[in-house]
Image (cartoon, rainbow, N blue to C red):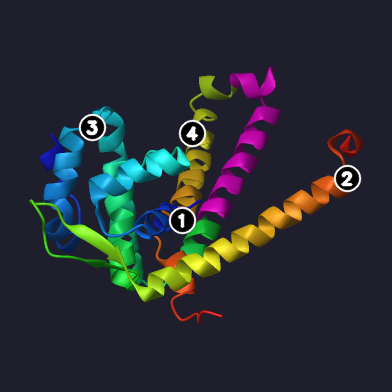
Amino acid sequence: MNRIVIRFAPKTWRDRYEAEVLEMLSQSPHPLLDRFDLLMTILAMRVDERMKNMWVSRRMIGSFGFVLALTGLAAMWFAAGHLTTGWAELPFHWWSAPTVIPVIFGLGVVGLAATRRGSTSTIATHKGEKAT
Amino acid sequence: MSPALLILLSLLEGPRHGYAIAADIEAFAGKRLGPGTLYGAIGRLVDAGFVIELPEVERRKPFQITELGQRHVQVETRSMAAIVRTAKARRVERPVADQT
């Protein structure tokens, strides 16, 4: 299972650390949690890798997610206004339930864009700094 | 505190391999780093030139902090110390009871 998870990591990183990561995972007292942690790191590395070759910045993607979530919220608010019991009834109609999707998706995009796990920006900040 | 800074702090004591770094961080910061977070951060630190990989010892790769990495720790800890000083000063000026 651990080998399957690590297969998704970028090759350069895998070549360098695969053996050690697998060893740590095999000795882990919380294997499920650590597998999830590894998956999230791999996802962030993949996103970072893609972002390097894209013209859109992390901030732009975050803004897109924010606008999407806001639009979804507005749709939810509009739908709730047309229901007899308001927000509580929202998930029970075919036309009102999907309004939740852009909110969840938008917030997910914001979260992914804001994650620092795979970001090198904080490290790069002081790279050129001189000691005083 | 970011995993990268915790790793650099751990390496100030001398070269260590991943497992020893994780154990040390758990001991001094009470924070457990999963293998993904740990080696993800180590990879970025190596790429940034803050840490170098030493030749393998018993199938484990020790890591060593570079001068650039030490400088980064200095800058970061200095900024943290300033934040702590400010927090303490503000708390002294305005006791908790008055903040309501």
Residue extending furthest toward the front:
B13
Which sits earlier in the primary sequence, circle 4 or circle 3? 3
Camera-near label (4 vs 3) is 3
Residue extending furthest toward the right:
B98
CB under 8 Å between discs 2 and 3 = no
Camera-near label (4 vs 2) is 2
> Is A85 colored magenta in this rendering?
yes
Q: Are the residues under badges 2 and 1 in a single subunit?
A: no
Which sits earlier in the primary sequence, circle 4 or circle 1? 4
| Image coordinates for residue A58, horizontal then vertical, percent | 46, 64
Report the number of discs.
4
Mark 2 = which residue? B94
Which subunit holds the residue at mark 4? A
Using the rendered image of the protein, determine whether residue A41 is visible from the camera's viewpoint. no
**Marks 3 and 1, how far apart in space?**
29 Å
- The residue tagged with tag 2: helix, strand or loop? loop
Above or below, B81 against A42 in this view is below
**Amino acid type, residue under disc 3 in the picture:** Ser
Using the rendered image of the protein, determine whether residue B6 is visible from the camera's viewpoint. yes
**Marks 4 and 3, how far apart in space?**
40 Å
Q: What is the magenta segment's predominant secondary structure?
A: helix
Above or below, A33 against A83 in this view is below
**Marks 2 and 1, how far apart in space?**
37 Å
Badge 2: few (under 14), some or many (20 or more) residues near its Cα, within 10 Å?
A: few
Mark 3 = which residue? A28
Badge 1: few (under 14), some or many (20 or more) residues near its Cα, within 10 Å?
A: many
Q: Which mark is residue A98?
A: 4
Quarter of the picture containing the N terminus of chain A is top left
